[in-house]
Amino acid sequence: MPSTSVVTISRHINDQERRHPDATGAFSNLLYDLALAAKIVSREVNQAGLFDLLGSAGETNVQGETVQKLDQFAHEVIYKAMDHAGHLCCMASEECEDIIAIPDRFPIGEYVLLFDPLDGSSNIDINVSIGTIFSIHRKISSGERGTLEDCLQRGTEQLAAGYVLYGSSTMLVYTTGMGVHGFTLDPSIGEFLLSHPDIRIPDPGARLYSVNEAYRDRWSDEQRRLVDHMKGTGRYSARYIGSLVADFHRTLLRGGIFMYPADSKSPEGKLRLLYEAAPMAMLAREAGGRASDGVRDILDIEPQSLHQRTPLFVGSAPLVDLAERFLAGTSEI
Ligand code: AHG
Ligand code: MN
Ligand code: MN
């Protein structure tokens, strides 16, 4: 007998708004618009193999990475879904070097959207899960329009964070600081329905570690000792998908630790603080886990630039703590 309790994301957002004393409808409308953009990107992702949406767009982005057509498509969809409703003062995207102003013809809002339009691009052409990651801040600058200052805020200041996972089903997972909630898209009615209320990282969770071991020779001795310790216990399994959203989603639901450490080639790590690590860190904290750059909590890092990178250790708190002890060279195991 199918469930009759249908909690759509709109109803859930409204319920959450009622619990936020100072929430305004604008914040809820911002989340609705994001959910709409997610449905449109999901539709294209699920048909990418049928249309000319696979492969490279023949350009490289500010990261020096080859821009996939779907990267560009997802960026455009999110930008156009979010630029006109009057909720935002500015945006920032992995695909744009500078902050994105709201066009003059549209009203300016009180919020900031930072996003990775398509995460896991290397997996697009092989039909492996990819995602979209978003982070929402409140405008803090004094002028009318948003500025870089509004984008360079600590992770602790985030009002909301979440991701869309385009996998065997499309899921939207988000937090506004009152727990982590997962919605699964029912394409037959075009609605995200609550499927994973109050997600908590299991404790003790699965002994899973997730890291790209091909880079072992580039790691620090401490990083190598950490992974050797995990392997040596004989109690861990390794999983690595190569899409942060997919690796994080598994970690959120099963436990374990995802690591993208600094290495000799990427001394600051590869993942970007503002629209990859910080949103994942808010979700992990809200689900009872935590995220670190190996030394300090990701949420406490004061951003210096829009696309700055950071090492990332995220998942079950005891395992992130263990990683920090090994990286400090102090772990007695
Ligand atoms: P993006 O596609 O947005 O550039 O992100 C890719 C990131 C992240 O999704 C994943 O965790 C990481 O790249 C994988 O990097 P490696 O291929 O170096 O392991
Ligand atoms: Mn990414
Ligand atoms: Mn991306």
Image (cartoon, rainbow, N blue to C red):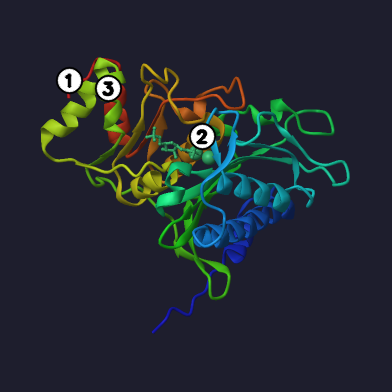
Secondary element type, mark 3: helix
Whether residue 32 appears in this view of the structure is yes
The quadrant in which residue 270 appears is top left
Q: Which mark is residue 278?
A: 2
Pointers 3 and 2 in contact (CB under 8 A)? no
Tell me the mark number nearer the camera, choosing from 3 and 2: 3
Q: Residues within 10 Å of mark 2 (few under 14, many from 20)?
A: many
Label 1 and label 2: CA atoms lie apart by 29 Å
The image position of residue 82, as x and y in percent, is: 71, 49
N-terminal of the two: label 1 or label 3?
Answer: 3
Which one is in front, 17 or 153?
A: 153
Compared across the picture, whether 146 is left or right of 168 comes to right
Kind of residue sitting beneath label 2: Ala
Label 3 and label 2: CA atoms lie apart by 22 Å
Secondary element type, mark 2: helix
Kind of residue sitting beneath label 1: Glu
Name the residue that disc number 1 marks.
332
